[in-house]
Amino acid sequence: MQTTALQGLGSFPIIMVLFGAIALFLILRLRSVLGKRVGFEKPPIPQGQMQAFNPPILDTRQSAFQQNARPVPDPRSALGERLMQIVNADPNFDPPIFLAGAENVFRVIVTAFAAGDRPTLQSLLTPGVYQTFDSAITAREAANERHRTEIKSIISARIEDAELISNHAAIIVRFVSDQINVTLDANGTPVSGTDNIAELTDLWTFERDLKSPDPVWRLAAARNG
């Protein structure tokens, strides 16, 4: 009598054979998916060339891990490809961490300008932008006025554009925030602005020489958006 393949299995449970086949199929599927690059990942670093992790931040005194899950451009888009050029040029650059740091520095700079905190501003601004901020603070001091700013919330923060020319990288971030801005005279009487919350849109350009040992991305331009 001819013995079939199933009969040849004897008492071995057929269900175990079926589970084994399913498991093999799932393993092959997982290998095909896990091997794909889906974000701003860099190519694998050859063994022996792994560098110490040093997160990219706008200011080395700020925490780089205050990530807020803001969306970043799709790496397959035109903007994503320009960001990928910076990723390839700077082993420490990571768009999501950069955007989280930019949002944090936005708060720091706005607050420092209102308080007339020149040292903080000088550490985060390019020389040209710092001169503009310093002149505004000096004029405010000469008029014996002070400025009060409160950032109630940052509604959105997104990377608007990016460019890499030689070693010089520039990234534009659009911030939409709810703020209170009012200028007070020596007696505390408002001379401009209001205590009402206003929605403001700002376009800030951060720049950095990628070959410089200084890791700080400095504000190089700011305008209403």
Image (cartoon, rainbow, N blue to C red):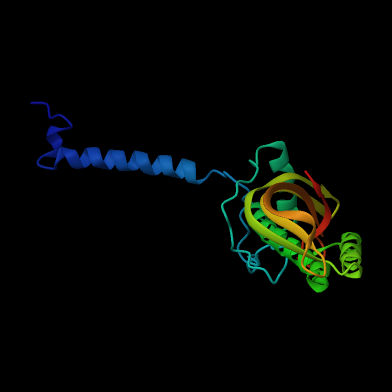
The C terminus: image quadrant: top right
Q: Is residue 69 above or below residue 56?
A: above
Left/right placement of residue 88 relative to residue 119 reads: left
Left/right placement of residue 90 relative to residue 48 reads: right
Could you say which quadrant of the image residue 192 lies in? bottom right
Residue most toward the left? 1
User: x, y percentage for residue 72?
Assistant: 63, 46
Residues 131 and 92: in front is 131
Could you say which quadrant of the image residue 49 lies in? bottom right
Q: Residue at x 42, y 43 (%)?
A: 30
Q: Is residue 148 visible?
A: yes
Q: Residue at x 78, y 70 (%)?
A: 120
Q: Is residue 92 visible?
A: no
Q: Residue at x 77, y 54 (%)?
A: 193
Q: Is residue 219 above or below residue 160?
A: below
Q: Is residue 11 above or below residue 180?
A: above
Residues 138 and 98: in front is 138
User: x, y percentage for residue 198?
Assistant: 69, 48
Residues 208 and 53: in front is 208
The N terminus: image quadrant: top left
Residues 178 and 41: in front is 178
Could you say which quadrant of the image residue 54 lies in? bottom right
User: x, y percentage for residue 24?
Assistant: 34, 42
Q: How many marks?
A: 0
User: x, y percentage for residue 121?
Assistant: 81, 67
